[in-house]
Amino acid sequence: MGDFANESTGGNSSGTATATCPRDTTLTRLLFPVLYTLVFLLGLVLNSLASWAFFQIPSTSTFIVYLKNILVSDSIMTLMLPLKILADSGLGPWQLKAFVCRFSAVVFYDTMYTSIVLLGLIAFDRFLKIVRPFGKFWVQNLCSAKILAGLVWLFFFVLSLPNVILSNKTATPESVKKCASLKSHFGLKWHEAVNYICQFIFWTVLILMLLFYTIIAKKVYESYRKTQKKDNKSERRIKGKVFIIFTVFFLCFAPFHFSRVPYTLSQTRGWMDCRLQNQLFVAKESTLWLVATNVCVDPLIYLLLCKPFLEKVLCRRVKTVHTNTKTELDTRTSPNEL
């Protein structure tokens, strides 16, 4: 965690730049700040709307608990983007780049992996609801969901805090060009170890999600065959919507994790040539932008899978001219996810 800022110098495993590795920063200084600005503006609007809606929705299900935590994570990620935009575009002072390296980049990655694990918990929650709709495991009660979400936040906070503390070398206009230059020797080792841990977490969550959705797909197909004659399209459509979670997860996060390990090695080791470092840097920056777009895509999950959220956003009111229908709706004292 911490390779969030634009960097332009090489370095070795001790964190000192032994040779200059010039980079063509046209993309990072011109194109990416524009792309990040679009993500920031759209993400700010969508997450503000989502915050307004969820503020009025009580946490009456594990699903809503996880969605609210993802919303908090996405909101924090969104607020970190202006700092990256200013630092990468060169519009901010060099001290801002030091702040990005030491703090905001760490917060960005911290919330990113928090979102990844929470999406995994949602996938597990959907898996239990569809595969064992009448079962009741301890992870399906509200208290457990809140505890799990809290533990996820605590785990990544403890994991990432040393990346802030160990970026303790004196910042200069030159050293801030590469975040690794601000880290102590142990800080570089910790940075590398954390990246491997996060890679393990991501691929574990991805494999588990793939397993969950493979089983869910089988259940949906079986349901389709059973209800085909009844033409129960509504039920099949609702079950099919859960696949949006895996699609969003893979498209936003997988490309970055393919490129992050070799890029991290280019930061912390000195054996990679300059050309390869540049290529890995561009790959990392491109896929990191895809990660950032997650703050704009997650609201689609809220709209497609959370019925109370959809009703709030569309300003739907429980009104009807038919007394029997009104009575039925009024009995729904707690919101339910689709």
Image (spheres, rainbow, N blue to C red):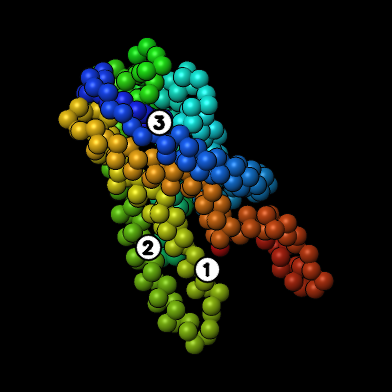
Residue at x 42%, y 82% (from the top left corner): 225
Q: Are marks 1 and 2 in contact (CB under 8 Å)?
A: no
Instruction: Say whether residue 277 is left or right of residue 252.
Output: left
The amino acid at mark 1 is Ile
Residue extending farthest to the bottom is 229
Residue extending farthest to the right is 321
Residue 56, percent from left and from top = 68, 47
Q: Which mark is residue 164?
A: none
Residue at x 49%, y 31% (from the top left corner): 89
Crowding at label 3, few (<14), some or many (≥20) Cα neighbours within 10 Å?
A: many
- Sequence-wise, the earlier of marks 1 and 3 is 3
Element under disc 2: helix
Q: Are marks 2 and 3 in contact (CB under 8 Å)?
A: no
The amino acid at mark 3 is Asn
Q: Which mark is residue 213?
A: 2
- In space, the residues marked 2 and 3 are separated at their CA atoms by 37 Å
Instruction: Say whether residue 84 is left or right of residue 191.
Output: right
- Sequence-wise, the earlier of marks 1 and 2 is 2
Answer yes or no: is residue 251 visible.
yes
Element under disc 3: loop
Q: Which mark is residue 6?
A: 3
Q: Are marks 1 and 3 in contact (CB under 8 Å)?
A: no
> Which quarter of the figure has residue 5?
top left
Residue 213, percent from left and from top = 37, 62
Nearer to us in this view, 167 or 281: 281
Residue at x 68%, y 54% (from the top left corner): 312
> Which quarter of the figure has residue 19?
top left
- In space, the residues marked 1 and 2 are separated at their CA atoms by 14 Å
The amino acid at mark 2 is Tyr
Judged by depth in the image, the label closer to the viewer, 1 or 3, is 3
Q: Which residue is mark 1?
A: 238
